[in-house]
Amino acid sequence: MRDARFWILAGSLVAHGAATSTMTVHLIGYLVSRGHPTTFAATAVGLLGVLSVTGRLVLTAARRHLRVTTIVAAVFAIQAAAVLAMPLLAGTRTGATATVVGFGLGFGITSLATPALLADRYGTTAYATIAGRLTAPVTIAKAAAPLAAATLLHTAAGYVPLLAAIAGCCAIAAIGILARATTTPPAPAG
């Protein structure tokens, strides 16, 4: 718990969990607000499930050539860019699909990356305890973020501030993952 890298990882995953759960809840409403039929919006959101598998395959294949932190940070940055592009592109079906695909790549990646990052840094001896301490704040963020987003949506003028917040969370997550990779671990207790 004294390792700054743990807290950087926790903050990154909290931000990312908040972003993904918020997008899952609010994406259909956003696409409908852009003039898309409900069936198209629901189908586009359904792509997120398929893309979670695609993100996992990308991570698995890329791990042979790149560090996990590099891959995860890149995918989180792609998610941020996709969300920022939504106001410009999501008015058409092609644009909506492209931005959903860009965002969806990150849906499944954390479920594989988190155990790899934890085991790599802390080993497997206390893995369950450390993973449990990490999971609690992430789960709380995933549960609370869509409600906070609904409040923002109803107090702000439309979806643009909400999308900016989601993109910001993805950017924070990407920066955090990179910072975690470059932060020096603490010296072992002696």
Image (cartoon, helix red, strand yellow):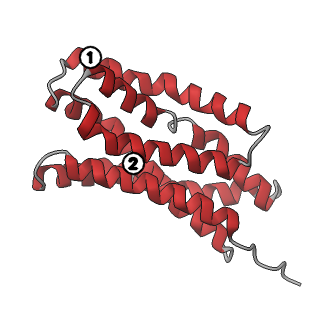
To which quarter of the image does residue 3 belong?
A: bottom right
Residue 133 visible somewhere in the drawing: no
Q: Marks 1 and 2, how far apart in space? A: 22 Å
Q: Which mark is residue 40?
A: 1
Residue at which label 2 appears: 19
Image quarter where the N terminus lies is: bottom right
Q: Nearer the viewer, residue 59 or 146?
A: 59
> Residue 44: image x %, image y %?
34, 22
Q: Considering only vertical position in the picture, is 66 above or below 11?
A: above
Secondary structure under badge 2? helix
- Which residue occupies 58% across, 26% down? 54
Q: Is residue 107 left or right of residue 189?
A: left
Q: Considering only vertical position in the picture, is 70 above or below 109?
A: below
Disc 2 marks a residue whose amino acid type is: Ala
Disc 1 marks a residue whose amino acid type is: Phe
> Residue 5: image x %, image y %?
66, 68
- Which residue occupies 70% across, 47% down? 68
Q: Is residue 50 left or right of residue 178?
A: left
Disc with the residue nearer the chain's start (1 vs 2): 2
